[in-house]
């Protein structure tokens, strides 16, 4: 006795889509069917609490998956809740779910149909991506007959009754010829491990070795039924954490640290996060578009493998999972962004990570340094992008110290820095210091900066900022714990004592006319002014910028990014005690129109330009001038 029914219109649309889909990740059908089976088992478990006869003898919950690879059939069985004939028609013949409706609406206007499928929970019908025929049989304890629902997806399905012995829901999938590779035991095992490893019900398959010997069937469990994040922290060994970390990151070295959170507060979720130490396959690259994002589990089912909106992009080195029951299973990537529960999780986790890093910085120094070497640059992005936390984050990264000859934290810098003034009274009293830095391409260049000598001589430390991102960081940071960050090249820097100041004023007067000539000799659009300075030690000259101007490095970077930045004028500072400046002055007094003087002026300016890693307009002139001097 078989009866034919038609699909409702909405279902038809979905089926049409799925059967004609060229969506490449057809694998998800198994995840959907396993999740249905696991739901059915959860429901049966709940029913059996009030109805002790509900389960009958068949009371150990499991999902069995078998293949017939000669006939290209996959068989999925579960002993969860069963369906009556009416329920089969209602549940399998219609789409009552709002999520699927959403999905269909989205698809209507989208050119990206194929990408969208994988992000939605398309349910039972996804099986038609790989099946030419599907048979679902379900039987209750107290009925003699089972109900069989069959469809070859031709706008209709059949229902018939049959005699089945025990209570199981069985789904038989007859694969399309071109999808026959799914009828392989190993292939299904792989998919289970990938998408359904943490489903809370045992998923069994026949042992591969015994596949053909039906007489001695041996089933083995493929998945890990107790997800590690559902376990008590005290039950988990550090080996288990490490193994789990390796399965997420493909990094087989120990992570720096992990965070295991289980909370019911505001949003209920569980999460395990790992901070790596060594570079790993996903997270070692500076490129934020690489894929190494957290896995999102909803109700213990993996629903998004790359839930990239769950942590800010500068924490992309974190490998982690999050499990929550507070968001719908059919959440899409777009919906994720707007989901307030996830927004709360994100905020909270970000805070936790920062706390953990602070802890590791103090308690796990050596390993933390390895971590910084590998991930410090990415961590610094956080300072740039997170206005609220920037100072806290600046506290956990390190910068190279001129005097210590190694990387140090800003705290360590401040411990040794000179107090400039104190603010406040009593308990509130605070010592204010200056944090000096120089940005450069590399350490050698930073150390060759003409201003460095003076700091060294006065035993003042300078941070040598040599990562490209550092330039941006000092642009947003300005100060750390009330202590100002100051570039050693900024022109209003005052390190002189009274004697040096007096000397400087006298020389300025004396050299005034020479400096005016120098300024006019060099293009006036390049130089704002020329002045004497006492801060140069043995050095002859330096080019500085006013504090609020772009630094030369920043200017260069912005130009390279195609921004229309006018060339910033510089201040040329000269050391009146240097032999070169003195002989320029002598020459000036003799003949202020001499070619030699002009050459000397150009030569000094060009040197300054070169050391700032700008390019000369014409190198030939520079070389000619040197040759002339040698002669
Ligand atoms: P969803 O599971 O999201 O509700 P599906 O299209 O996957 O959507 O399934 C539709 C319905 O069919 C389910 O809600 C459930 O009631 C029923 N169903 C599916 N698979 C099973 C199963 N293995 N056992 C019992 N009921 C099932």
Image (spheres, rainbow, N blue to C red):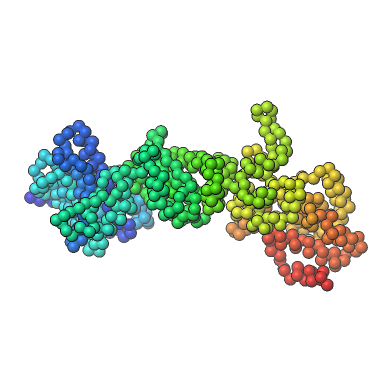
Quick one: 581 or 149, which is closer to the camera?
581
- Tell me if 422 is positioned left or right of 319 in this view: right
Q: Assign the C terminus to one quadrant of the image.
A: bottom right
- Residue ranking furthest to the right: 590
On the picture, is 396 further left or further right than 259?
right
Q: Position of residue 295 (x, y in %)?
A: 39, 48
| Residue at the top extreme of this rendering | 426
Query: Considering only vertical position in the picture, is 112 above or below 321?
Result: below
Instruction: Residue 104 in the image: state x and y as whole percent.
Output: 31, 50
Q: Which of 374 and 84 is in front in this view?
A: 374
Residue at 41%, 33% (x, y): give it: 265
Above or below, 89 against 74 in this view is: above
Query: Residue at the location (28% across, 55% down)?
Result: 189
Residue drawn at x 59%, y 52% is 469
- The tally of labels here is 0
What residue do we see at 38% from left, 34% from top? 264
Q: Where is residue 161 in the image (x, y as percent from the top left)?
A: 10, 48
Question: Is there any visible trace of residue 95 in the rendered image?
Answer: no
Q: Report x, y in % for residue 137.
A: 16, 49
Q: Would residue 188 be visible to someone looking at this image? A: yes
């Amino acid at each position: 006795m078989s009866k034919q029914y038609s699909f409702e219109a909405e279902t038809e649309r979905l089926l049409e889509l799925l059967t004609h889909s060229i969506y490449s990740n057809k694998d998800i059908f198994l995840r959907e069917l396993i999740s249905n089976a696991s739901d059915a088992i959860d429901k049966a478990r709940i029913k059996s609490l009030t109805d002790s006869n509900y389960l009958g003898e068949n009371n150990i919950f499991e999902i069995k998956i078998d293949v017939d690879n000669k006939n290209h059939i996959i068989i999925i069985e579960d002993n969860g809740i069963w369906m009556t004939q009416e329920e089969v028609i209602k549940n399998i013949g219609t789409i009552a779910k709002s999520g699927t409706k959403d999905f269909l609406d989205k698809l209507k206007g989208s050119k990206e149909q194929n990408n969208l499928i994988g992000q939605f929970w398309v349910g039972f019908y996804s099986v038609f991506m790989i099946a030419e025929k599907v048979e679902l049989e379900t039987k209750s304890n107290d009925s003699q007959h089972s109900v069989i629902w069959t469809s070859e997806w031709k706008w209709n399905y059949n229902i018939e009754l049959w005699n089945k012995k025990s209570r199981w829901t069985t789904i038989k999938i007859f694969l399309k010829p071109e999808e026959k590779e799914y009828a392989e035991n190993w292939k299904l095992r792989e998919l289970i491990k990938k998408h359904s490893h943490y489903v809370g019900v045992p998923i069994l398959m026949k042992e591969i070795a015994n596949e053909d010997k039906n007489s001695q069937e041996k089933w083995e469990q493929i998945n890990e039924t107790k997800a590690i994040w559902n376990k008590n922290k005290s039950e988990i060994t550090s080996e288990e954490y490490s193994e789990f970390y390796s399965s997420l990151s493909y990094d087989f070295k120990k992570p720096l640290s992990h965070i295991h959170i289980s909370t019911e507060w505001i949003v209920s979720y569980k999460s395990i996060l790992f901070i790596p130490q060594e570079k790993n396959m996903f997270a070692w690259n500076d490129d934020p578009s690489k894929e190494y994002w957290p896995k999102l589990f909803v109700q213990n089912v993996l629903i998004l493998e790359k839930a990239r909106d769950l942590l800010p992009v500068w924490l992309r080195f974190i490998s982690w999972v999050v499990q929550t029951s507070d968001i719908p299973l059919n959440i899409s990537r777009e919906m994720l962004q707007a989901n307030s529960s996830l927004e709360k999780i994100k905020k909270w986790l970000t805070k936790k990570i920062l706390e953990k890093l602070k802890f590791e910085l103090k308690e796990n120094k050596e390993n933390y340094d390895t971590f910084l070497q590998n991930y410090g640059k990415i961590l610094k992005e956080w300072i740039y992008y997170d206005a609220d936390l920037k100072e806290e984050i600046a506290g956990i990264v390190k910068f190279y110290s001129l005097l210590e000859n190694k990387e140090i934290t800003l705290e360590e810098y401040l411990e040794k820095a000179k107090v400039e003034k104190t603010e406040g009274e009593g308990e509130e009293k605070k010592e204010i210091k200056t944090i000096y830095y120089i940005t450069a391409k590399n350490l050698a260049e930073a150390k060759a900066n003409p201003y460095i000598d003076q700091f060294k001589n006065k035993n003042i430390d300078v941070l040598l900022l040599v990562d490209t991102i550092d330039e941006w960081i000092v642009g947003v940071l300005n100060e750390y714990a009330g202590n100002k960050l100051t570039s050693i090249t900024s022109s209003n820097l005052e390190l002189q004592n009274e004697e040096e100041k007096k000397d400087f004023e006298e020389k300025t007067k004396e050299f005034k006319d020479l400096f005016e000539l120098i300024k006019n000799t060099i293009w006036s659009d390049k130089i704002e002014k020329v002045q004497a300075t006492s801060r140069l030690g043995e050095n002859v000259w330096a080019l500085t910028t006013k504090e609020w101007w772009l630094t030369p490095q920043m200017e260069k970077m912005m130009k390279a990014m195609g921004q229309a930045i006018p060339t910033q004028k510089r201040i040329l500072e000269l050391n009146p005690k240097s032999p070169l400046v003195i002989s320029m002055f002598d020459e000036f007094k003799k003949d202020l129109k001499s070619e030699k003087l002009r050459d000397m002026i150009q030569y000094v300016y060009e040197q300054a330009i070169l050391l700032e890693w700008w390019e000369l307009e014409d190198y030939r002139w520079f070389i000619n001038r040197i040759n002339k001097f040698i002669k």
